[in-house]
Image (spheres, rainbow, N blue to C red):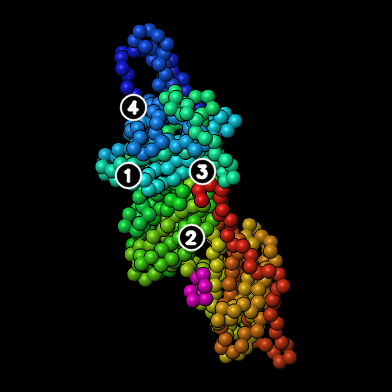
Amino acid sequence: MRGVRVASAAVAVVAAVAGAGCKGERKREIGLAHRDGGPPVVIVEQPTESGAVGPLEREKEPNDQRDQAAALPLPGGVNGALASADDIDFYRIEAGAARAVVIRLTGPAADEGGVDLVLELHDADGKVVARSDRGPAGTMEGLPGAPLAARAVYFASVTQLVKKGRPKKKKKPAAEDAGAAGGAAGAATYQLTIDAPAPGADDEVEPNDKPEAAGQVLLSEEKAGYLGWSKDVDLWKLSLVGFGGGFALDLAVTGVDGAALAVDVLAPDGRVIAARKGQKDRALMVRGLLPELGAPFYLARVSGSRSNPEMAYHLRASSRALGDGDEAEPNDDPDRAIAAGTLGDGATGERRGYLDGGDTDVYKFEAGREAVGLTVSVDAPASTDVVLRVLGPGGAELASADNGKAGQREEIASLAVGRGEIRFVSVSGAALGDEADPYVLRWTSAVNLPGQGTQGAPTDQPTDQPTEPPTEDPYEQ
């Protein structure tokens, strides 16, 4: 078995499997007899997706400075302890060949003597290149796919998060003894492991936060990536080869536990074509995106409100033919509004669209040779609270409807539109980000008869409703 070295021809006398205290991990303890017949020697293996990385060594103090750091074998691991709130332990990592590594830091829960651990990866100059601080004591901290440059030296550090206002305890002189013993009484113990598994064909390869390093995604392919550490950003290159007229791009990203996703679609020159922010734990979609003429690819930028080194997201790009009445993105503002048609006596129509992740859809209407009264309404999905607005040519709001309830139908009736005038109808609101059903926008117009008059439908309810979920998080600031 990889990573297990047996110094003698000892016979295994004990084998056990037990939970490791974090989701998806197991520890295997193998008892090996001493060659002198003494008590068994227990080797603890910390498995990763690629196999075991054990046995775990014991921390060697002092290691409070980078120049004191002991080497962390790759693959391998260490049992260590923080003797006080301001203790810091450094470990030296020799990259060798360029590679991506998986680093995990685990410790006991608070009721078992654990503390809130923080894991950081530093370059040779001490700059922090990746950080994991996901939660309280007992939460696994990790850096999946952290990239190491060829022949470079890095340092992993383990510290304790101390909340502001709480005085730090002075470091105990017994720290050296605690480290040598793998955790003395009162010391906060932890296990730090590192491995270098080979990525799969459909997995992201870090670093991928620059366009030139973005992973290629063909239509109908599914790729997997991680929000691996605080402020991790992944770029994917979405091929537009084969797109024809009337076909739109749909992009779907599965949810990640504990994180609110953000997905931006960028043009090759870096312009933001579409921007979406989802809700915690939920999937996020960009639908009906009509590629610009001649664009060879788009870039999808995936990030999140916090990291999760244990659960990958899955990204899939697909194409579909737009049906009659389907909206086509981008149409988020009057400059990019969809031309819905000419208003006249008896004119009617409808459009179907989605409000994924704070999306706003804008439709353009123009009156013909006669003044008309315009009535517009929106039927919303059960989980979506829509806001309906009518804007003038300069973007000023002329009327709005917002009853403030999910699934509520909104309507603006008999709004006057003069001969040849332009109006923009805006549909926005709070949606889940992966709503299964579309909203339906409907409109009718009629020529005003003498003495009949028209009226708007302004509302005295507040219109500045939040369209995005809060993303503040006490960790990973």
Question: Label 4 vs label 3: CA separation?
Answer: 29 Å
* Contact check, label 1 and label 2, Cβ < 8 Å: no
Residue named by callout 1: 124
Question: Label 3 vs label 1: CA separation?
Answer: 25 Å
Q: Which mark is residue 286?
A: 2
**Circle 1 crowding by C-alpha within 10 Å: few under 14, some 14–19, many from 20:** some
Q: Quadrant of the N terminus?
A: top left
Residue named by callout 4: 3
- What kind of residue is marked 1? Ala
Please say if 293 is above or below 373: above
- What kind of residue is marked 2? Val
Residue located at (55% from left, 81% from top): 394
Sequence-earlier tag: 3 or 2: 3
**Circle 3 crowding by C-alpha within 10 Å: few under 14, some 14–19, many from 20:** many
- What kind of residue is marked 4? Gly
Of helix, strand and loop, which one carries label 2? Answer: strand
In the displayed structure image, the side of residue 44 where residue 260 appears, left or right: right
Question: Label 3 vs label 2: CA separation?
Answer: 28 Å
State which region is magenta. 331-337
Mark 1 or 2: in front is: 1
* Residue at the outermost bottom position: 450
Residue named by callout 3: 134
In the displayed structure image, the side of residue 332 where residue 102 appears, left or right: left
For the question of whether residue 49 can be seen, the reply is no
Sequence-earlier tag: 3 or 1: 1
